[in-house]
Image (tube, helix red, strand yellow):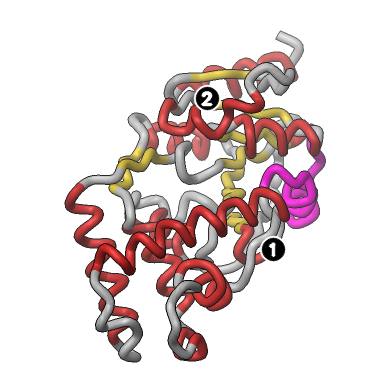
Amino acid sequence: MQGRKRLHKREGMVYMLKAVLFDVGGTLHTQVVTEASTRRFRSLIREVLSRRGILSGIDDETLFSAITEGGKRYKKFTEEALTELEPDVIWQDYFLAPFDFDKALLTGLGEELCCIFDLEEKEIIPREGLHETVAALRARGYQLGIISNIMSRTMVGKVLERHGLTDAFSYVLQSSDCKIRKPDPRIFDLCLIDLGLTKDEVIYIGDTISRDVRGTKAAGWRIIQIDNPLTYHRDTAYRNMGYAPEYFIHALPEIIGIVDGLRQAEKGG
């Protein structure tokens, strides 16, 4: 699944809320570093670089320490600029910047390397109730989509396939495609243009104040924030700044009660 996939309005929808959009990492699943994920990640990165003889003489500690530090520098850049660079540039100018080699050798490898970084560095653990929640939302006629900050253009499609949800999400908007990162409200505005909907017809589910709550509030969207202790550190600076979601949940199945309540309210009940 690459690029922005479009949703189509369904006939006969009479309720205001029509689409439910999700963040990916931290929301559909959580992620943790393990010894197995570290070994897999390093092996896959080495395999890609070895195709062109890149840094084959550099030991693992030196190489992956540089990649880690490069990742931190790139994260800082994206949080300040709220944009995404092309994958080749990310690896040339950030992840492998300290090494003296012909950076042109990385041309065409960046996307695969970014996907490995996003998909394999940590173990991906689906949230409890993920499939049941998605099925219940679809059964109620809601259109489902994704808005994600992500370096890779292919990671979201692969992780949805891994979760067995390839056909469940008809719309995917990634910062890697549109070059806009949350919390910039323009990524949410772009979503509405793509879907042909208004902000009153959508709701977003995400796990962070720093990206998800701030972004949706700036765009005028409603948001359900799902608790994620693994990302508390990202929100430290924003906790007492008045960024409050409309709803706060601890588990995905709680979404169903919320949207059912909204639908009941729309019916005047």
Using the rendered view, name the quadrant where residue 243 is placed. Answer: top right
Name the foreground residue: 158 vs 260.
158
Residue 28 horizontal/vertical position (percent): 44, 40
Using the rendered view, name the quadrant where residue 157 is placed. Answer: bottom left
The relative height of residue 229 versus residue 240 in the rendered view (above or below) is: below
Horizontal side, residue 133 vs residue 210: left or right: left
**Is the residue under label 1 in contact with that under label 2 (CB below 8 Å)?**
no
Residue 46 horizontal/vertical position (percent): 27, 75
Using the rendered view, name the quadrant where residue 237 is placed. Answer: top right
Residue at image point 41% right, 63% down: 67
Which of label 2 and label 1 is nearer to you?
A: 1
Horizontal side, residue 100 vs residue 242: left or right: left
Name the element at disc 2: helix
* Upstream in sequence: badge 2 or badge 1: 1
The relative height of residue 261 versus residue 225 in the rendered view (above or below) is: above
Residue 27 horizontal/vertical position (percent): 47, 37
Q: Which residues are magenta?
A: 182-200
- Amino acid type of the residue tagged 1 in the rendering: Cys
What residue is disc 1 on? 178
- Amino acid type of the residue tagged 2 in the rendering: Ile
Name the element at disc 1: helix
Name the foreground residue: 206 vs 193.
206
Local crowd size for mark 1, using a 10 Å CA cut-off: few (<14), some (14–19), many (≥20): some
Q: Is residue 232 magenta?
A: no
Q: Is residue 183 magenta?
A: yes
Distance Cα–Cα, label 2 vs label 1:
28 Å
Mark seen at residue 255: 2
Q: Is residue 140 visible?
A: no
